[in-house]
Amino acid sequence: MQSWIPLVPDSASTFSWKVDALYFYLSGVTLFFTLLISAVLIFFVIRYRRRTPYEIPRPVAGSHKLETLWTIIPFVIAMTMFGWGAQVYFQQYKPPANAIEVYVVGKQWMWKLQHATGQREINQLHVPVGRKIKLIMTSEDVIHDFFVPAFRTKMDVVPGKYTTLWFEATTPGTYHLFCAEYCGMNHSGMTGSIIVMEPREFDNWLSGNTGSTTPAAAGQQLFGTLGCASCHGANGEGGRGPTLAGVFGAQTELTTGDKVTVDEAYVRESIINPQLKLVKGFGPIMPTFQGQISEDQLVQLVAFIKSLPAGGQVQAPAANPAATPPRPAASPTQNSR
Ligand code: CUA
């Protein structure tokens, strides 16, 4: 758990050494030029000091060679910093496709987390070592920021949108989680811990924490109680809204002719502000759900729609209930909207 250099926090993710290496490179370059310039400065002060009261210095003519050199060398050094930094940045902010997903909702002043398998946690996140974990995050109130120093990664958690953060922990242990965006009186208390476990230990932990429904299953319930199924019926029975099976991750065409990718952000937006990006062939008849459902419930609906397999004809309850939308007939409020 102790970091190998006392200057830096614990190192416990695949990003850690990359960020540290870049950081030490920046510090090294800075230190090198600070020392060089100081040394030259001191040398010149002594070497070219005025020796007699009447000494007149010789005027200095410009030198193109020198000017070119001191333009090109710093430029090259700056570009190595830029290139290296961009590489590390893009790696961090482009989540891999095969990651385990965890939903995170920040609020004043706590972190609420839910695993795709249903387990809920507050201010704690258990993850297996050596696996890629992707957090899909939003906020119920103001901007927060999910920061795990030992993983060398952080990301703003913003109301009204989803942001993602991913990491792969390399060392089992317990690591600090901080809120890194001032968010009100108890901002400094909005902390938690990430508990990195051996995969087998993690599986034990997961199976010992059952009893909560998965976000997708909870979303399926909401889909029924909110009356979504009456228009978005699995087999297009409603016909008033586009079917949702298999649309997640695909592109869809809008009435404007534009195309959008159906991702978390688009699904969320379509629930909160349905008229904004209408799918081609459908009218502006869906009511807004703004203020009627919580961020938790939005996350559940997103998880449900995400879980619907492609093919369009999903209706009978399958072995995995989370993967099946409710039949329109089973919806208690199907005619309410
Ligand atoms: Cu949440 Cu600071």
Image: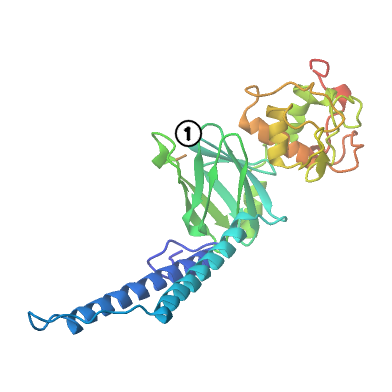
Q: From where the camera sits, is residue 219 visible?
A: yes
Q: Nearer the viewer, residue 250 or 116?
A: 250
**Horizontal and vertical percent position of residue 43:** 23, 82
Q: Nearer the viewer, residue 281 or 263?
A: 281
Q: From where the camera sits, is residue 168 visible?
A: no
Q: Is 212 placed left or right of 47 in the picture?
A: right
Q: Is 121 placed left or right of 8 in the picture?
A: right
Q: Mark 1 — residue?
A: 108
For the point 65% across and 25% down, which residue is it? Answer: 293
Q: Nearer the viewer, residue 163 or 2?
A: 163
Q: Does the residue labelled 1 lie within 8 Å of ligand 1?
A: yes
Identify the amino acid type marked 1: Gln
**Horizontal and vertical percent position of residue 198:** 60, 60
Q: In which quarter of the image is residue 168?
A: bottom right
Q: Residue furthest top?
A: 336
For the point 38% across and 66% down, which residue is it? Answer: 7
Q: Is 190 placed left or right of 241 in the picture?
A: left
**Horizontal and vertical percent position of residue 130:** 63, 62
Q: Residue furthest left?
A: 53
**Horizontal and vertical percent position of residue 313:** 92, 37
For the point 47% across and 56% down, which residue is it? Answer: 149
Task: Check the picture and name the quadrant holding the C terminus.
Answer: top right
Q: Nearer the viewer, residue 117 or 102?
A: 102
Q: How is the image coloured?
A: rainbow
**For mark 1, does the 10 Å Cα neighbourhood hold few (<14), some (14 to 19), or many (20 or more) residues?**
some
Q: In which quarter of the image is residue 248?
A: top right
Q: Is mark 1 on a helix, strand or loop?
A: loop
